[in-house]
Every structure is written in C-alpha cells, then in structure tokens.
Amino acid sequence: GEEGGRTRKPKIFTCYVCNFTMPYVYFGRTPKMAPQMVLLEDSFVANDPFTPEARPLCLGGKCAICSACVCVTCSLYYTKRVCGKCAREVRGAMPVEMHAVIDRLPGGAPAAQPPR
C-alpha cells in the first residue's frame, strides 16, 4: 500500500441525530477482531475503550429508509435499522408493541404528542 510509515487517518462515525462521534475500525457484518460475531446488519464497529481486550462495540448503522448514519440510541432495530424520524413516519405500519419504543426515540416527539 501507500502507507509508507504514515499513520492512516481514522474513520469517524457520527450520528446525524445526536452528533455522537467516535472513531470506528470496521463497517460490515463480521468484524475482523471478532470473526465469531455475525451482525444482522452492516454496522459501524469500534474497539470498546472500556475493556482491556478491546472487544467489538457496535456504534450504529445506516437507516434503511433515509440512509443516514445513526447510533444505537437514536434508532431502533426491527428487521432493519431505522432512525427515529423515519420510524415515526412509518409508525402506523409497525407492530403496536413497537409504538412505545418509537415514541421514546430521540429526534423529536411524534406530532400527536406535545413535547415534555
């Protein structure tokens, strides 16, 4: 490669909702640092800074509807990752059991409810 002793610029994950930012080491379904782990979606994965063995830590993924990068806190995973904004737009098509989860997602309250 063209590395030539230079350090490679870190890849940065940023959630479009909360602006959480963290370097990531892998994007995909099978992190190289944990080949036994198979994720259900393409995910941004970092080395967990709180474990000495640097276990893989899933930061988030891309919204299946709008393709925005979104962290696990600002999205939900129900067959596919969906950001809060898009989840509210398709709320009627989601199972009733998911409505409370959707309502708690960051990124604005549903139109029918005043902000708390």
Image (cartoon, rainbow, N blue to C red):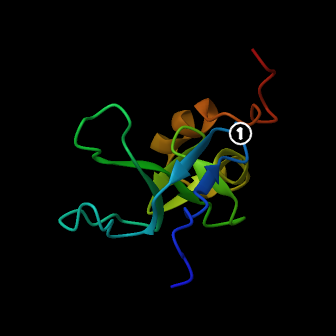
Residue pictured at 43% horizontal, 66% vertical = 41
Image position of 112 (left or right of 74)? right
Q: Is residue 82 above or below residue 116?
A: below
The part of the image, by quadrant, that contains residue 37 is bottom left
Type of the residue with mark 1: Asn
Q: Is residue 61 above or below residue 84?
A: below
Q: Nearer the viewer, residue 95 or 40?
A: 40
How many numbered discs?
1
Residue pictured at 73% horizontal, 37% vertical = 107
Q: Secondary structure at mark 1?
A: loop
**Which residue ends up furthest to the top in the rendered image?**
116
Q: Is residue 98 above or below residue 10?
A: above
Q: Nearer the viewer, residue 82 or 53?
A: 53
Q: Give the position of the C terminus as an image quadrant.
A: top right
Q: Nearer the viewer, residue 88 or 50?
A: 50
**Which residue ends up furthest to the bottom in the rendered image?**
1
Image position of 38 (left or right of 69)? left
Residue pictured at 50% horizontal, 43% vertical = 98
Q: Position of residue 46 (x, y in %)?
A: 43, 50
Residue pictured at 73% horizontal, 53% vertical = 89
**Which residue ends up furthest to the front in the rendered image?**
5
Q: Position of residue 6 (x, y in %)?
A: 57, 66
The residue under label 1 is 19
Q: Position of residue 104 (x, y in %)?
A: 59, 30
The part of the image, by quadrant, that contains residue 100 is top right
Q: Position of residue 11 (x, y in %)?
A: 59, 59
- The residue carrying pointer 1 sits among few (fewer than 14), some (14 to 19) or many (20 or more) residues within 10 Å by Cα, namely few
Image position of 22 (left or right of 97)? right
